[in-house]
Amino acid sequence: MATPRTVAFYTLGCKLNYSETSAIGRQFEDAGYGAVPFNDGADIYVINTCSVTDFADKKCRNVVRRALRKNEQAKVVVVGCYAQLKPQEIADIPGVDLVLGAAEKFRILDYIDDLSQAPGKGMVKAGEVQEAKDFIHAFSFGDRTRSFLKVQDGCDYKCSFCTIPLARGKSRSNTVESVVANAREIAKMGTREVVLTGVNIGDFGNGTEVIEGIRPKKEALFIDLIRELDKVEGIERFRISSIEPNLCNEEIIEFVAQSTRFAPHFHMPLQSGNNKQLQAMRRRYQRELYADRVALIKKHLPHCCIGVDVIVGFPGETEADFLETYNFINELDISYLHVFTYSERANTPAALLPDVVPMEERRRRNQMLNILSEKKKRHFYESQLGTVRKVLLEKGKKKGHLTGFTDNYVKVDVALAPSWINHVTPLALNTVNAEGLVIASLDSALV
């Protein structure tokens, strides 16, 4: 059998997965494979999976079928969180040739030769998650405007609803030196924005080496990392993807407020605005701490965008509990929500809890919070009208128009030529259109 020479990738889930897909892609390219678009009929398909919700599991099956429609002789390799949690279930999907766990996915090329010799489908190479104890650095590339840079992996938290520790193992981090070197490499590619990613990036420091000149005799912490990244030339701005509220301390907030490169944008998971639910979820804070963090951010950065994760329909969440969450969020000075409908995950304590909320009720609560999110986002966007903010311009959907995000995460639409793409340009924010985007124009000072 001839050695396959083309490979295509499909990524499901979070920004961290996108960074890791790129790292795996570089391995293939270094080995002489040609990377092709997913729809072009590759010899090998690598599907990087997520398993946050049941929908992600079903999506994996759909992607496998799509790959085989492009090339029925293709070899299909599945990696990622779903692959670690349910390897045999994936191996039983028709068309899957190889399943790699968390410790094996970055040695993917070691297993490729075995595919030509495998007598049947669905070979599984997924060891215990404890074996995934090394930090493998990764960052995404190919998008000129933005790169996702992995700085941390795994999680030591024990939230009762979450499978991530089972899928990715214990918390571990890159070194400050290595992250800075990766950022400089990204800058050489002409990328203007870097998004720091990880499972629990505020926990940065586990497994790091002591860097000379940074907290001598102690491990470098997240604040040390972002201070060093702020000095990297060539990157217009850094964005923190998500950080736990108990780890988003005033030192970090104050630093971002005076930073030359870190965007005024925090995304902090709340999950519930009800302390009873937070305790059942085994979160490491109460709602009072969350409200304090929001107030601190707005004190130092009044124009800051604040995103919030929230879960609805957790076991035991009564209507009164949900309304307490709704009212708590409604009163917070935040900018948008990511709303998740709770879904039972195998091998999690929450899956065994009583007082299960009917799915229809979970969906109703989800809809209510999504409507609230739209109201919050529009209010935040309207608060920014009449200001001038720097926008990283990207390709738009309409001819003659570009889109982009301000530093504080307002999405804009502007009538400009494609030559402006990947430029960071001051734009005047004028009105909010029917699609919920801010109509912007070149700052008159530049015209």
Image (cartoon, rainbow, N blue to C red):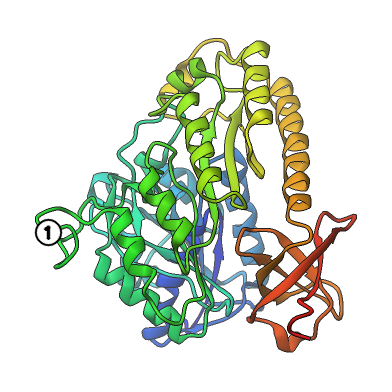
Task: Look at the image and tell me in which quarter the C terminus lies.
Answer: bottom right
Residue ID at (27%, 71%): 178
Count the marks: 1
Q: Amino acid at mark 1?
A: Pro
Classify 205 as above or below 85. Answer: below
Q: Is residue 402 left or right of residue 323?
A: right
Classify 229 as above or below 98. Answer: below
The foreground one among 152 and 93 is: 152
Where residue 240 sits in the image (x, y, percent)?
47, 56
Question: Which residue is label 1 attached to?
Answer: 216
For residue 342, what is the image quadrant?
top right
Where residue 228 sits in the image (x, y, percent)?
32, 68
Residue located farthest toward the right when viewing the structure as drawn = 434
Residue ID at (67%, 25%): 326
Q: Crowding near pointer 1: few (<14 within 10 Å), some, many (20+)?
A: few
Residue ID at (14%, 68%): 212
The foreground one among 341 and 386 is: 386
Q: Secondary structure at mark 1?
A: loop
Residue located farthest toward the left when viewing the structure as drawn = 217
Where residue 255 sits in the image (x, y, percent)?
40, 56
Task: Look at the image and tell me in which quarter the N terminus lies.
Answer: bottom left
Q: Is residue 117 visible?
A: no
Q: Is residue 88 visible?
A: yes
Where residue 179 sits in the image (x, y, percent)?
32, 69
